[in-house]
Image (spheres, grey):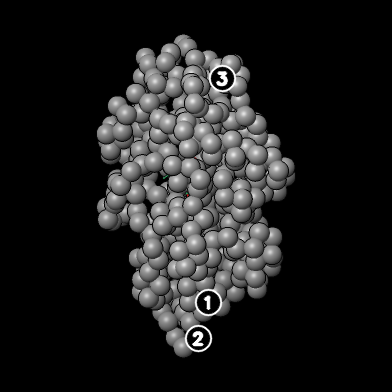
């Protein structure tokens, strides 16, 4: 009998399992594929504190500082600092200005950028009339799978048990769930934590705890920047043209959307991330980049892939009890990688008896009451 069984070994589940094992809980981690091989592996891994919802910004800032000292705790450096420029127009420009003020008030290092400063950071980047740009200098990106693997290694080092299996069902008894029924046998624990991302409802619906999560496809395009922009560059998140772009080595960048639109996917198991879905988004991404950074109009597509987001009604995670002894940490809505350190801490505190460090901004009740924690921005994934 374990104290806790965590189901799902992505960035979320491994962080939770590590935080629990470190506190001395006898913890099992059930993962049916490889560690970090789910949506974590398909993530672009942008790490920023630039959020408009203060409670989420606080958790993001905590996570950012965790990534900065990741090697001290886990023996491997996973974070690359490159900075982040957020740019938008109209109501998004107003939101950027207000957000900079809010984040500065919280002690988070952001500032507004004049157009020529933005151009100095990304040659050719245009910030037009009626637009606003902001810089978060400390932001960057992390190696997502290496992060999950490092959490997992540390989890094992603290005595955690890895169970390579699939939880196909949860069996309920009088006082809650009695066992996770895996293909090779039962895993029994006092508490279960479900961190299965887009596969959450498959498991939770069996105990009548289906959550308001829809599954949405996001396409990533790899861009060969060409001679114009060689070396690294800050992540550019362009609300006006619906794209973001982060460096991948000195010559390439990864490009995705800030609003993937209504691309619902019914069955995550039938989804092939390496199919050519991304080609559907490629023309729109290329036009968007050329509008913001005209010299990159001749950049070339070098490939791509797609991933899935587990999207809640307000595009914020759900971290809450869904049965007497079942904690869900799901619905990360396309921005949950960077929050992994904070989510691990929050989930461990909830198992321990109650949230202390951040409170719990992701309680399910907010959605039932219609008290959404939605972003100020038109693109809700920005948060
Ligand atoms: C294309 C893309 C780009 C993204 N970019 C960013 C970004 O820049 N910054 C950011 O912060 N976030 C980003 N995200 C979001 C972020 O990557 C995810 O929110 C996060 O990695 C999800 O981690 P997870 O552990 O919850 O899920 P996953 O990594 O999907 O892990 C869930 C695991 O559960 C396992 N599992 C499922 N069902 C079972 C079962 N029944 N039994 C056992 N195991 C099971 C799966 O095999 C899987 O390994 C992006 C996501 C995508 C798809």
State which quadrant residue 362 falls in: bottom right
How packed mark 1 is, by other alpha carbons closer than 10 Å (few <14, some 14-19, many 20 or more), is: some
Q: Secondary structure at mark 2?
A: loop
Mark 3 Cβ inside 8 Å of ligand 1: no
Q: Is residue 321 above or below residue 155?
A: below
Q: Which mark is residue 261?
A: none
The disc, 1 or 3, on the residue closer to the chain's N-terminal end is 3
Marks 1 and 3: CB-CB under 8 Å? no
Residue under numbered circle 2: 175
Q: Is residue 250 visible?
A: no
Q: Using the image as rendered, state which of residue 371 and residue 46 is in the foreground.
A: 371
Marks 1 and 2: CB-CB under 8 Å? yes
State which quadrant residue 139 falls in: top right
Q: Position of residue 148 (x, y in %)?
A: 54, 49
The disc, 2 or 3, on the residue closer to the chain's N-terminal end is 3
- Between the residue at mark 1 and the residue at mark 2, the CA separation in whole angstroms equals 8 Å
Q: Is residue 330 above or below residue 272?
A: below
Q: Which mark is residue 115?
A: 3
Q: Is residue 115 visible?
A: yes
Q: Using the image as rendered, state which of residue 340 and residue 17 is in the foreground.
A: 340
Residue located 53% across and 77% down the image:
325
- Discs 1/3, front: 3
Residue under numbered circle 1: 325
- Between the residue at mark 2 and the residue at mark 3, the CA separation in whole angstroms equals 60 Å
The disc, 1 or 2, on the residue closer to the chain's N-terminal end is 2
Q: Using the image as rendered, state which of residue 42 and residue 154 is in the foreground.
A: 42
Q: Residue placed farthest to the bottom in the image? A: 174
């Amino acid at each position: 009998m374990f104290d806790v069984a965590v189901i799902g070994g992505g960035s979320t589940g491994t962080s939770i399992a590590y935080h629990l094992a470190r506190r001395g809980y006898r913890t099992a981690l059930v993962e049916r594929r490889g560690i970090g091989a789910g949506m974590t592996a398909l993530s672009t891994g942008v790490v920023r504190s630039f959020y408009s919802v203060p409670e989420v910004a606080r958790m993001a800032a905590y996570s950012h500082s965790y990534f900065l000292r990741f090697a001290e705790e886990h023996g491997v450096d996973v974070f690359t600092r490159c900075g982040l420029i957020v740019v938008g127009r109209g109501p998004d420009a107003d939101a950027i200005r207000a957000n900079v003020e809010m984040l500065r008030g919280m002690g988070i290092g952001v500032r507004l950028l004049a157009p020529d400063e933005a151009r100095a950071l990304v040659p050719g980047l245009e910030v037009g009339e009626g637009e606003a740009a902001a810089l978060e200098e400390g932001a960057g990106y992390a190696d997502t799978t290496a992060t999950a693997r490092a959490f997992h290694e540390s989890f094992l080092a603290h005595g955690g048990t890895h169970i390579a299996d699939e939880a196909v069902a949860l069996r309920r008894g009088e006082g809650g769930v009695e066992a996770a029924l895996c293909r090779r046998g039962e895993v029994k624990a006092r508490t279960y934590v479900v961190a299965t991302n887009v596969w959450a409802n498959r498991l939770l619906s069996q105990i009548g705890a289906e959550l308001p999560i829809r599954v949405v496809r996001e396409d990533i395009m790899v861009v060969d920047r060409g001679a114009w922009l060689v070396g690294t560059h800050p992540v550019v998140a362009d609300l006006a043209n619906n794209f973001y772009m982060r460096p991948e080595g000195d010559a390439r960048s990864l490009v995705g959307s800030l609003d993937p639109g209504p691309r619902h996917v019914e069955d995550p198991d039938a989804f092939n991330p390496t199919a050519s879905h991304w080609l559907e988004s490629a023309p729109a991404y290329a036009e968007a980049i050329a509008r913001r950074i005209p010299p990159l109009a001749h950049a070339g597509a070098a490939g791509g892939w797609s991933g899935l987001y587990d999207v809640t009604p307000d595009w914020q995670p759900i971290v809450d009890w869904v049965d007497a002894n079942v904690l869900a940490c799901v619905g990360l809505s396309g921005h949950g990688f960077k929050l992994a350190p904070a989510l691990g801490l929050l989930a461990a505190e909830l198992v321990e008896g109650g949230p202390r460090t951040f409170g719990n901004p992701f309680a399910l009740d907010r959605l039932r009451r219609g008290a959404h924690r939605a972003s100020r921005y038109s693109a809700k994934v920005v948060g």
